[in-house]
């Protein structure tokens, strides 16, 4: 099939290189790096490269079977070596997740990636075990039992992930559950025990989704958490289990990408999300087929390299489930509003807009109540930075010192030199949402998001028109004079002119004018930071500063988005 041709070329290229090269080592020095320095990627980069070699070999074997039913000798040789290599590893879990190890036993630590690895190994020996050397399949079976199945089924002490309410529930329970389905016969006692435990966690995962189906963690984590839920649900149904997808809330969750996806296949990057999140076409095809949900804009089967972690079910189900009818479906212009998440997204036009209310204790939380994104002609002009580099500091007590998560890394007000605070009580109240036919109005009460002595009230109103006009009005009431700043964030360096500020991208530009009770002075700052994959990046922060007298004040920011050709 033509839409799978590029993916097949990629995995065969990885297999060819793996056949003639050694896999990167997971040394003790790399293993200790997180504990010594807090940095994760020294260990994780080679770890995920090793998973990529294994998954590519499995995918190549699937393509061989699709072609003539026989797996080629070279592919089988690489697959056997990569399975053997994974069995050699000290632990399948990541050092950053050592707190999930019961009794400090890292060999039997079942974290996200141990669950993923177990599923990958179990499915590969289930699919191709009869063509692989017997000692390879036997060793894989022994490792699966000792590292994952016995700890999960036989030891009924609570596991750390079971207290969580986010993607961990679905990935660990779904990954181990799918591994068990691929490994055990129907009458196996351990299979029943694992499915019972997995179902409990998966039920908890869905219960903690809001009724509007929105994922506050962002689109990447929808793909991750809900993806593993759906993969497990279909695997169990095909094995004769219950149909977990037949639920009204499940359909709402499945529709999330089509509601919030921009017209060019990108997504709002709120929280630790990414605007370049890739929806697996196999997953989306199955959800469309089973639940009849609308299709987000998907240009093609995601590349093998698009998933840095190389998760097996994304690749395998892209090969098995992808339907051409989910590809290249245009996004009709329109507004989506998710009342529980308090997101509004207007997408599909030449100019696009997204904003959020919510609270400051969301999954993968940022201090971002009242944040917005502004796009033109497929280019993001005012941005949400999304996830920073994952390390010990990022998930520790200093999390909100990182520009990606901090209040000053978002397009929200700074009042009396103070940003928003973390906690569910620091929240927005939606006062009004209205769709206007050519855009939307969202009014938020942000008072509870701040803790500033003398601040009586602060509210923000977005008035958006699809032709490219956004008016942001902030109303502030205080009982004493205090400094006030509007902050706007972009990856494009703004140009300060006499009476306006301009962000000029490759395809579009955005011009800002403003008004208030007193003069506001613009100031541009450059923040050098580290992106999610450890890459260096520059962020540009525009500050509009003023000093407010006691009483009520109204500050208006007007953004105009247009093509550079105009």
Image (tube, helix red, strand yellow):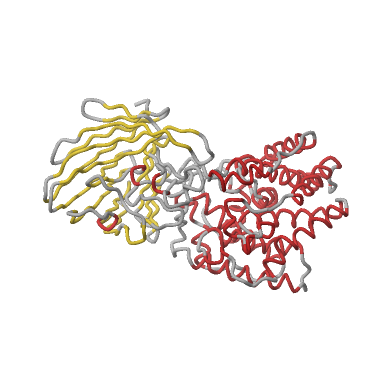
Establish if 566 lies above or below 258.
Answer: above
Residue 198 image point, x, y percent: 62, 68
Which quadrant would the C terminus be assigned to in this image? Answer: top left
- Front residue of 34/467: it is 34
Q: Which is nearer the eye, 111 or 539?
A: 111
In the displayed structure, does residue 518 sit left or right of residue 214? Answer: left
> On the picture, is 43 further left or further right than 211?
right
Q: Where is residue 536 in the image (x, y as percent from the top left)?
A: 48, 33
> Is residue 134 left or right of 41 when viewed as pictured?
right
Which quadrant is the N terminus positioned in?
top right
For residue 301, say whether it is visible: no
162 or 104, nearer to the observer: 104
- Residue 285: x %, y % from top left: 61, 53
The percent position of residue 429, horizontal first and vertical second, equals 29, 59
Task: Give the total of numbered labels.
Answer: 0
Q: Residue at x 28, y 30 (%)?
A: 501
* In the displayed structure image, the side of residue 432 where residue 149 appears, left or right: right
In front here: 335 or 509?
509
Residue 77 in view? yes
Q: Is residue 465 above or below residue 289?
A: above
């Amino acid at each position: 099939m033509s839409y799978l041709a590029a993916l097949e070329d990629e995995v065969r290229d990885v297999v060819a290189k793996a056949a003639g090269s050694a896999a990167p080592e997971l040394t003790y020095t790399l293993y200790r790096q997180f504990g010594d320095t807090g940095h994760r990627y020294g260990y994780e980069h080679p770890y995920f490269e090793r998973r990529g070699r294994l998954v590519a070999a499995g995918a190549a074997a699937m393509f061989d079977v699709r072609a003539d039913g026989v797996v080629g000798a070279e592919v089988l040789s690489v697959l056997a070596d990569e399975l053997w290599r994974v069995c050699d590893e000290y632990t399948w879990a990541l050092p950053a997740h050592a707190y999930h190890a019961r009794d400090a036993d890292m060999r039997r630590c079942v974290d996200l990636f141990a669950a993923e690895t177990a599923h990958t190994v179990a499915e590969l020996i289930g699919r191709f075990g009869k063509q692989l050397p017997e000692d390879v399949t036997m060793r894989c079976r022994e490792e699966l039992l000792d590292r994952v199945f016995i700890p999960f089924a036989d030891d009924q002490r609570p596991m750390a992930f079971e207290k969580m309410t986010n993607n961990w529930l679905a990935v660990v329970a779904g990954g181990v559950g799918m591994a068990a389905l691929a490994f055990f016969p129907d009458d196996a006692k351990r299979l029943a025990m694992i499915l019972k435990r997995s179902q409990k966690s998966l039920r908890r995962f869905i219960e903690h989704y809001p009724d509007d189906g929105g994922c506050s963690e962002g689109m990447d984590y929808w793909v991750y958490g809900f993806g593993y839920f759906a993969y497990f649900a279909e695997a169990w149904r095909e094995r004769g289990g219950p149909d977990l997808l037949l639920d009204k809330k499940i359909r709402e969750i499945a529709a999330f990408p089509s509601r919030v996806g921009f017209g060019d296949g990108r997504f709002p990057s709120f929280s630790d999300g990414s605007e370049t999140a890739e929806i697996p076409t196999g997953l989306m095809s199955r959800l469309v087929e089973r639940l009849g949900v609308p299709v987000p804009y998907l240009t093609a089967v995601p590349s093998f390299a698009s998933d840095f972690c190389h998760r097996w079910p994304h690749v395998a189900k892209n090969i098995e489930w992808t339907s051409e009818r989910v590809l290249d479906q245009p996004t009709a212009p329109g507004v989506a509003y998710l009342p529980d998440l308090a997101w509004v997204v207007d997408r599909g036009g030449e100019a696009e807009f997204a904003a959020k209310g919510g609270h400051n204790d969301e999954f993968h939380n940022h201090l971002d109540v009242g944040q917005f994104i502004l796009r033109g002609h497929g280019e993001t002009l005012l941005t949400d930075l999304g996830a920073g580099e994952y390390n010990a500091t990022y998930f520790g007590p200093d999390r909100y010192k990182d520009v990606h998560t901090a209040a000053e890394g978002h397009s929200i007000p700074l009042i009396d030199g103070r940003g928003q605070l973390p906690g569910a009580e620091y929240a927005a109240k939606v006062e009004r949402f209205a769709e206007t036919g050519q855009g939307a109005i969202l009014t938020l009460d942000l008072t509870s998001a701040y803790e500033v002595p003398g601040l009586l009230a602060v509210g923000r109103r977005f008035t958006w028109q699809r032709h490219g006009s956004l008016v942001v009005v902030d109303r502030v009431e205080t009982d004493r004079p205090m400094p006030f700043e509007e902050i706007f964030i972009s990856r494009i360096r703004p140009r300060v002119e006499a009476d306006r500020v301009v962000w000029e991208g490759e395809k579009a530009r955005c011009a800002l004018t403003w008004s208030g009770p007193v003069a506001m002075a613009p100031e541009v700052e450059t923040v050098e930071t580290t992106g999610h994959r450890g890459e260096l990046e520059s962020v540009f922060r525009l500050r509009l500063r003023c000093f407010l007298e006691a009483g009520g004040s109204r500050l208006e920011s007007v953004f105009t988005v247009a093509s550079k050709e105009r």
